[in-house]
């Protein structure tokens, strides 16, 4: 008799309610013979070894306790198949990866990373001197998820900039400063979703960062389907190949979301590469869910046959 495969989908108690993908994924698993559980990553004494595959889906509060989260990922990888793998999580959980990709020729949204509030003025000046006239900046932590700590401010408001940088530094995080690109007002942000490095779908996300530091919750109402253009697809493919090579991965990533914003010349710029726990906007593309679920199942170890009891 063939042993039943078991899959764990990882979330947390605060994030599950806003994981809009999860109901679609669970429904798709009902059409398979695979057992699936939704488990909170910080559940005490949970036996992760019982699962063939453990998939990170919405553990979005991990940035508040990144070290225990990395320890959890290590624990899982010691006894099961963690997707995406721990090496990916370590690399992707700190957005300084953007500077590495930039050095490899990837066009990114201009990015300055600072670790002290004394670096603020130099960082803003560098953005202005080397790229274009900057009127507003976006400030975010190097470690964060689900728009945590992201704010849009005028460069004239140095007091608020300093206050927010000080707050993020106080959390023990580095700080990213980027120009606010007003092309997003017209063209939005393009999110491209890949399964096993194969293009699945793309969405246009409306601007979420309002002036005066207000941030809209990234609900589904701000997203709609779009078709990525050939330049975006070529750049995404190049980035995924770089990541696989840089990290020495033997297999393609189970899932990836690449977020692009149009630059001043109309060319795509990488805003973020989400390969830890990305929202996939599956409610907009229910026909893609079965493909994702099958990709999860295919990552499980080969089936184990057990004897029928006499």
Image (cartoon, rainbow, N blue to C red):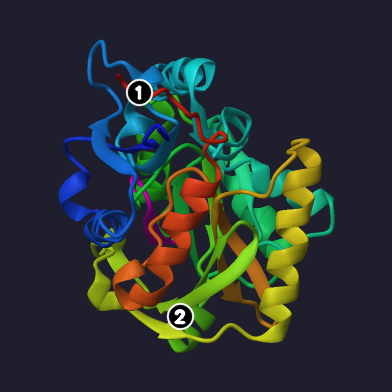
Residue 239, numbered label: none
Q: Residue furthest front?
A: 310
Q: Which residues are magenta?
A: 148-155
Q: Quadrant of residue 162?
A: top left
Residue depicted at x 60% and y 71%: 199
Which residue is at the far right? Answer: 104
Q: Quadrant of the N terminus?
A: top left
- How far from the left and from the top, in percent, is residue 135? 51, 70
- Give x and y (percent) for residue 17: 15, 50
Q: Please identify the quarter of the rendering in which residue 288 is found.
A: bottom left
Q: Residues within 10 Å of mark 2 (few under 14, many from 20)?
A: many
How far across and how far down the image is residue 143, in percent? 47, 37
Q: 126 or 75, which lies in front?
A: 75
- Quarter of the rendering occupied by the C terminus: top left
Name the residue that disc number 2 marks: 188
Q: Identify the mark nearer the N-term, 1 or 2.
A: 1
Query: Could you tell me which residue is drawn at 42 percent across and 40 percent down?
Result: 55
Marker disc for residue 65: 1
């Amino acid at each position: 008799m063939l042993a039943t495969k078991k899959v764990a989908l990882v979330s947390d108690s605060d994030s599950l309610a806003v994981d809009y993908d999860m109901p679609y994924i669970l429904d798709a698993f009902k059409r398979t013979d695979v057992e699936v559980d939704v488990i909170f990553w910080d559940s005490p004494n949970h036996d992760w070894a019982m699962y063939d595959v453990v998939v990170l889906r919405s553990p979005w509060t991990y940035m508040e306790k990144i070290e225990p989260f990395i320890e959890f990922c290590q624990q899982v990888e010691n006894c099961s198949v963690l997707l995406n793998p721990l090496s990916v999580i370590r690399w992707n959980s700190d957005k300084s990866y953007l500077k590495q990709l930039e050095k490899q020729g990837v066009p990114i949204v201009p990015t300055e990373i600072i670790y002290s509030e004394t670096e603020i003025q130099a960082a803003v000046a560098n953005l202005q001197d080397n790229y274009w006239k900057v009127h507003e900046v976006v400030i975010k932590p190097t470690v964060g998820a689900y728009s945590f700590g992201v704010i849009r401010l005028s460069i004239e408001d140095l007091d608020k900039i300093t206050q927010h940088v000080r707050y993020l530094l106080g959390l023990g995080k580095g700080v990213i400063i980027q120009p606010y690109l007003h092309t997003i007002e017209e063209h939005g942000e393009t999110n491209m979703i890949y399964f096993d490095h194969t293009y699945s779908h793309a969405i246009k996300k409306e601007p979420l960062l309002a002036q005066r530091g207000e941030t809209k919750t990234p609900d589904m109402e701000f997203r709609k389907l779009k078709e990525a253009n050939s330049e975006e697809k070529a750049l995404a493919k190049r980035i995924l190949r770089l990541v696989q090579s840089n990290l020495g991965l033997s297999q393609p990533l189970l899932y990836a979301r690449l977020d692009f914003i149009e630059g001043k010349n109309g060319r795509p710029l990488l805003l973020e590469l989400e390969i830890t726990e990305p929202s996939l906007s599956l409610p907009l593309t229910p026909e893609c869910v079965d493909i994702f679920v099958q990709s999860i199942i295919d990552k499980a170890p080969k089936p184990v046959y057990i004897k029928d009891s006499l």
